[in-house]
Image (tube, coloured by chain):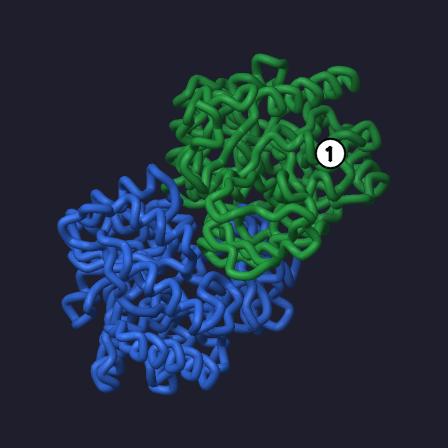
Chain colours: A green, B blue
Amino acid sequence: MNFHEVDTPAVIIDQSIADANLRKAQAYADKHGLALRPHIKTHKLPLFAHRQVELGAVGLTCQKLGEAEVMADAGLKDIFISYNIIGRHKLERLKNLHRRVTLSVAADSNEVIDGYAEAFAGSKSPLTVIIECDTGADRCGAQTPGQVLELARRIEAADGLAFGGLMTYPPRDRKADVNQWLATAIEQLEEAGIPCPRVSNGGTPDFYSVSEVKAATEHRPGTYIYSDRMQVAFGHGALEDCALTVLATVVSRPTENRAIIDAGSKALAADTCPAPGHGHIVEYPDAIITGLNEEHGMVDLSQCAEKPKIGDKVRVIPNHVCVVTNLFDTVTLIEDGDVIAHLPVAARGKVT
Amino acid sequence: MNFHEVDTPAVIIDQSIADANLRKAQAYADKHGLALRPHIKTHKLPLFAHRQVELGAVGLTCQKLGEAEVMADAGLKDIFISYNIIGRHKLERLKNLHRRVTLSVAADSNEVIDGYAEAFAGSKSPLTVIIECDTGADRCGAQTPGQVLELARRIEAADGLAFGGLMTYPPRDRKADVNQWLATAIEQLEEAGIPCPRVSNGGTPDFYSVSEVKAATEHRPGTYIYSDRMQVAFGHGALEDCALTVLATVVSRPTENRAIIDAGSKALAADTCPAPGHGHIVEYPDAIITGLNEEHGMVDLSQCAEKPKIGDKVRVIPNHVCVVTNLFDTVTLIEDGDVIAHLPVAARGKVT
């Protein structure tokens, strides 16, 4: 069956493009002697997680316990949860997960470390804790290399925990600062006799300039598997490298220059990007998706020489692909335009 | 169990507030002699759909066939699909649904009407088709009263279809224009001998000024059941009338004035509203959610006298509640702070 026969809106993934994106990234990581630990938040699919490991990834990154549990259920073996895990119920789940996979988890405060320490006290194999560093992105993370040292000492002092290294989600375009920040932290740890086996850097936008952050030993790209309009706007690859599109139907043509498609914010999400509008329509590159309601995408056709008819199907490259994946229970995998599978998005909606 | 014990992020719905919102709207509709046909997109729950009907709603509005199928499965009997249904597969589902419930559906073009006509040719009971009118919101809809008349004639000429009236999703703040538009369309229909039994007006923001659109015989509010920050910003009710909050945990306090909560765009959605930031934190009304990543909400505490600790739970009133409901598989119903049910969001993710 050709993918154009799939009912809309639908997420269509071109397997060849996705696989080429995975292979390219692994080759780049290999060339730079860097471990790859892909973030599964983008695809949320065991199929692609296994493929990433098969190609050479050292393990996976998940942001949620629920995502990690899905991946463990699917037989994945090495998982880093790049998030502070807090609260009795979640810590219980973390302990169960720790029995099943090689697990590491983030922390950026005494409170979070103390939670892990209490939960893992007396554990036969210690929990590996990675300290998150705020190297300028102003999100989570220790604020100074000095704070890193204090937190690492606290981890080392807890009998059920082991200090596993550092992680950061770096700010865009300030690599020299990130490099300096991490290098200083590692130096202070070494001076204190605490080895830092892993330094995990993040994000698809920063991946292909990763050698600028010399301290990094691994990278956690997510979006690279599918790419999206935001990545292209950032200068990473071309629209042709986007493996995921939302197939939509033109449901109304109220005026000469207006089309309405059945992909709104419930299909494309409302995330904006530097390029104009809410997504790129492959068949009508001059069309602009000017607005989204939940089930309606408003399209301005005024710059288009050819214009679609009611009932025509179009493919939309979303602005931000990770949030799109989370909106669909199922995605359709294609090869040479033919449908080869409808896959349940196993780790979708894992909010906790 | 108190709702603060629920694992986060979680959607918490205060049943008393929701029910008060429902009763208030029904009383208003009754007072104005207006039929209420609530849009289920906001709650996506059979429980509340039944309650809306119990209170006096004439039926429901769904935007998706999949939503309507869920409501039919749950025993709801009168459903209007306010959307152009296109394509062989969807028309087959529409026929099946038509056998089970009192169904009406929108159309705004010859193409859509011809699709219905072909699917319902020879049908024992005709399909009720409502013509969507673009009264200024620039979305779907017939562009002029004259076009309405042409479309109504086309519906009347098809043996399996019956013209059921008009619908509009009106522009905000141009009620007089909407009124005039609809009045002219109805007049032209009457002159042509085509009675117009139903004129359906839409949207929670316009509901409490509905008497301004005199032509309307029914209204389709959705958001009114929960309300949200956008509705409050529009002047509809107070923050205390918001029945749905996202319970979140403070997972990091990297600096004096920054908190990170575990509700990001995967919990709150990225929709903006006239009020600043990405949601209102009930316990810290002076805090501003300055940014969202998928699993992180960045909170500026600089204006707060009291500041939350790591591990504290807070409730966030979302900017736009309908998109939040679609992100959670389950919502938690509370009464006087106690959890009374965890409900699966039965019509969530029904994209087709």
In the rendered image, residue A123, in percent from the top left (x then y), is placed at 44, 25
Name the chain letter of the residue that bears numbered label 1.
A
* Left/right of residue B123 with respect to residue B5 in the rendered view: left
Q: Tell me if residue B46 can be seen.
A: no
Which residue does the image show at 71% across and 48% down from the upper left?
A137
* Relative height, residue B295 to residue B174 (above, below): above
Secondary structure type for disc 1: loop
Question: Which quadrant is the C terminus of chain B positioned in?
Answer: top left
Which residue does the image show at 67% across and 18% down from the upper left?
A23
Q: Quadrant of residue A318?
A: top right
Question: Which quadrant is the N terminus of chain B positioned in?
Answer: bottom left
* Left/right of residue B324 with respect to residue A61 in the rendered view: left
Q: Nearer the viewer, residue A217 or A275?
A: A275
Q: Residues within 10 Å of mark 1 (few under 14, many from 20)?
A: few
* Left/right of residue A152 with respect to residue B261 in the rendered view: right
In the rendered image, residue A196, in percent from the top left (x then y), is placed at 70, 26
Q: Nearer the viewer, residue B206 or A208?
A: B206
Residue position marked by numbered label 1 in the rendering: A238
* Relative height, residue A44 to residue B129 (above, below): above
Which residue does the image show at 65% across and 61% down from the upper left?
B256
Q: Amino acid at mark 1?
A: Ala
Q: Tell me if residue B106 can be seen.
A: yes
